[in-house]
Amino acid sequence: MKLDRKDPITILPDIVKGDADWRLYRSIKLQNGVTCVFVHDKESKTTACSVAVGAGASHDPRELSGIAHFTEHMCFLGSEAYPEENEFKKYLASHGGRSNASTSMSQTVYKFDVLAEHAEKAIDIFSNFFISPLFTQSGTDRELNAVDSENSKNMSNDGRRRLQILKAMANPEHHYSKFSTGNAQTLSMNGVSNCGSTIHEEKEKDEELLSQNTFVREVMLAFHRRHYRPDNLTVVIVGPQKLEKLQDWIVKRFATITNRWEVKDETEMSDAELLVEKSASEAPDDNFDSPPVVYDPPFHSKYQCNKWPILLTTLPLQSMRKMYMYFPLPSVKELYDQSPYHIICHLLGHEGPGSIFATLHLDLIDAISVGPRLSEADHSLLQVNISLTEKGEKNWEEVVSTIFDYCYLMYDVVKKAKEEQLKDETNEALDQLMHIWGEVQKIKSLRFHQTSPGSAIGLAPSLACSVRRIGTKRSLSIGSLLDERNDTLPLDHLFDFMKQLTPQNCFIEHCSQSAWEKRNVKNSENRSNLFGLKRERWYSVDYHLSSIDENTIKKWSQEYLPKKQKSLFLPSENKYIPTDLSLCPELPEEATKHPRINKKIEPPNLIVNDKEFGRLWHRLDDRYCLPKASVTLLLRNAVVQHKWKPQQDSWTFDPKHNIQSEILLNIFHDALAEKTYSAYLASLSWSLSKIPSGLVIKCSGYSQHLTSFAIDIVKEFFCKESSFITEKSVQTNKDRMIRYYESYLKSKRADSYASYYTSLLMSSRGFGVEDSLSLTKNLSLESIQKHHQRLTTFQAAKVECLVSGNLSRRDAESFFLQTQSIINKATSRSEGNGIKNGNVDNLHTWIPGPFERALRQGEDVHLHFQSQNSEEQNGAVRMTFQSQTPGFKGCHDMSSANESMVQTAALRVLCHILKEPLFNQLRTKEQLGYVVSSGYYIDYSFQSWSSCQANRAVASAITPINSVVINVLSKKVPPPVITRRIDDFLDSFRQKLIEMNEEEIQSHTNSLSKKLLKPIQKLHTEVDDHFSNIRRYSPECIDCDIPLIWNRNEQLAKAIEGLSRSELLHAFDAVIAGKKRSRVVSHVYGNKFNFQSTNSIQKNSNEGKVGRKICHIQSISEIFQKR
């Protein structure tokens, strides 16, 4: 169908954008009803497109649960215009692109991006998913396995398991209760529902019936016709092309879509059409121009016989102590920025003085977060998420009581404010609420206006979803409260919502192993009663419902006055909200007018190089035009993970020091949580973390208060004489870590364990989870205090400081001097510091960074372990090919480019080429499993270094190590068979490289090169890039008077562009396919596969085929022996 260029379009309201947003927007509605948004992003090197369809799992027929999700999968597998199943992914892979999709309850969202110069054909292929998808029968048969594998992957995930239990608690007639993912059972039927009812029961049984999968295909086609109508589609395209070009690309394709759904009488509909039409009426229409929907909550006391509050007990796979309080509330879709959720969540989730968190922290709770668990057109569900301590687990009723106390406090203030509105008297409560509302407004609007745009692929889908639900004008700014002020406080809405935060409108979930063991077992085996043990239908997960004691409920009531807590009060003024957003006066005028993302990033300047204390690097931002900055401190400190061994005359890795450091940092974060929460709200963030080379303190946010805030963090850690370390904090964090280690090997997916065992062999210097658990159990308050003293008084600690953003050189120097004073004062306390000066002279024996073991040339190590997760059906294979040639570190003279640069470039390109055909063969064609991935990995291995330093101070030589990794998760075949399938594919892939035409090779090299040169758009990304370079290379370069290399990516991009086919084949043979390749293959067996004996494993392996001896390892002790 040709588009009549005179066909009318409707111009939609302009999108409100932030002050820092350089993008241009245009929004229209086509005559056929498709809503289109075109975004010109002059800084983007890619073009991204997304389509939001106003239909999701809520629209599924109950007889075919998962059909919306299945339709999403099938759309990618060819169209009438492009019938080849992998046409789209193949094109994207060759041109630096990627794609994905997701199905929620209310919508299905598709997205892709590609290098901008290759966008039009990608759009053409993509648009045909919505114009004329094939849904071939063969594709339907195969992709059903993919959906089933995806569901299998989810079944060992605690979040997914709890989601299914939550759905089981809902009104079974409500659309939210539907099973969204689908599986082989729900998507295999012959006109018969999963409940046993039939469609058109009046039809004779001997009528000709379609095969099961043929019928599923018919339903998908009907679902596509019914819901993928043009008036139900929102298209967003973002790219560097002019708006007119983007509009032309989209309009001429999406304007051809017609409404192919015919309105018929039910008697005229096919079985497939009838299923789709009936289910469509079950879900509310939440598109922007749809009328308001009647409040219809899926959760209500009447569905549990009016017995609320009720206790739901669930058993997690991971070790956790969680409690969730759920409050069904009306939809806020029509309230926009007047939603009471803004202030309710702000106050209930606050962590400052007077808050729930401050009152209960460390004693009864570890953390609290509050937000909408669900926010749909016909309802919302407020969730209060609490992490409990061991004591809090035993006294959870007290935690709930405190939360209700705070709700009543809020209610009383809101009620009083309403009364003050009506009377001419002191407005104490009203003024307090208006002030809080004003602060929330300032924080949210500042964030909106002072945030630079992200990637095109990040914007396109989020904007498509937002436009579909709330229209164009507010699509970016919703939630930013731009039009709100102190006096626009939504007091009436707030009062209506606060009245519903009561025990009678609440159900509580207690999720922990202990709670499960102690649950009320009365009538627990009678699954038909309201109370007792229940089993969720689709995951077969058990849960338990029980009543709550009447006396307990009475204590939770607002009328129970004796226990009201005076420690609870609303937050005071936030001093960290910035008032000065000016840019640094040292900037040139052109840098203060607008962002200059295409400007080349200059490296930070080394402005202080103190041989005794450390180095200060500074870069004044001249690209982002924002009043933001970042301060990063690396304290190179051997004590973090190492211990001096006099008998060996060297520093060696010490697992105990490593665990002590981990616990110490967690204690420090807990101690500062309340003090720094106001800063967090005002977008000032901080972290203290450990890495192999020491401790990293990082602070970022608005520049006005940043350096003073960062100095406060440094002072707290170095100057408080361990006062933040208490018996309670040690026990709380010990408990948290013990539970983590105890559940680690029992709660994760098989592919996570495959990675764990590979790491244990290749890069870990510890002795695994079991050893870490034992060490953690033996920690004491005294041991943590002594370790803190060792860390803060270690005299040989050297500092790397990077100050970037809207801070002047003078600001940076002032911060560095203050930091130096604090640290020098701490390290001067030499008494009892445990570090003798003589050991400083031997610091060259310390390996100050990550460590990677090198395989011998030709070595082939196969690990075999049974998953200890009882719910994990899948097996997994992680195949790691390690290069014997060191990776590329950069060079000062490109004419001296060496083998490391060529092989690094070649391996990156090989992985770029490999990804799509591997996925297409193992995932799409062979249907081995839902997860089939591959990629290039780079690790870094440090070694001691002292030859060019007279004073033998901290320095290191670092070696990048290239690896190619293939990962498969499958319940279809055992792990050794997966390994054979991968090897078979790699054998055929070499021939593909030989036969691949030069144009296709060049498309891969060009696209990868351009991706490496893609301009950085965020300050934090730039800071991370610069700091990584300083952290890794400054000791071996600066300490030896060698300049740092800052243009490593540019050098690598140039090398990639010049690669030949022979260089690709040489790298492939050397690292992946040749007899001298070195690899580790980690096999993990789910409960569907019995762990095999060595003889059986060897029989199933390719050992004889490849003529190579394989080392099989089947125990942790063998790993350590191999190391």
Image (cartoon, rainbow, N blue to C red):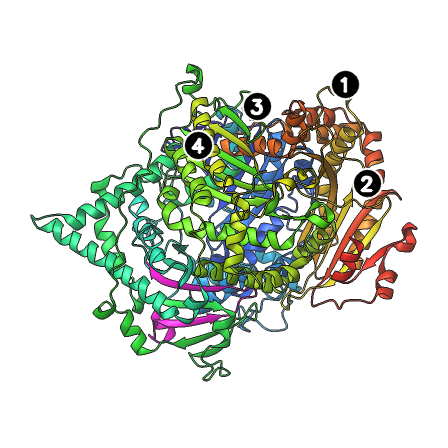
Q: Residue furthest front?
A: 831
SS for callout 4: helix
Residue 372 image point, x, y percent:
39, 54
As displayed, is residue 436 above or below residue 619? below
| Amino acid at circle 3 | Pro
SS for callout 3: loop
- Residue at 43 percent of width and 64 percent of height: 323
Sooner in the amino-acid sequence: mark 2 or mark 4? 4
Q: Which residues are magenta?
A: 300-329
Q: Residues within 10 Å of mark 1 (few under 14, many from 20)?
A: few
Q: Position of 1104 compared to 873: left or right?
A: right
Give how far apart the Cα atoms at labels 2 and 3 are: 34 Å
- The reply to whether callout 2 and callout 1 are in contact (CB within 8 Å) is no
Q: Residue 304 lies in magenta, yes or no?
A: yes
- The reply to whether callout 4 and callout 3 are in contact (CB within 8 Å) is no
| Amino acid at circle 2 | Val
Closer to the eye: label 1 or 4 = 4
SS for callout 2: helix
Residue bearing the label numbered 3? 603
Q: Position of 1084 compared to 486: left or right?
A: right
Sooner in the amino-acid sequence: mark 2 or mark 3? 3
Residue bearing the label numbered 1? 895
Q: Residue 318 lies in magenta, yes or no?
A: yes
SS for callout 1: helix
Sooner in the amino-acid sequence: mark 3 or mark 1? 3
- Residue at 26 percent of width and 52 percent of height: 570
> Residue 818 got which mark?
4
Give how far apart the Cα atoms at labels 3 and 1 are: 22 Å
Closer to the eye: label 2 or 3 = 3
Give how far apart the Cα atoms at labels 2 and 1 are: 25 Å
Say which quarter of the image contains residue 171: bottom left
Sooner in the amino-acid sequence: mark 1 or mark 4? 4
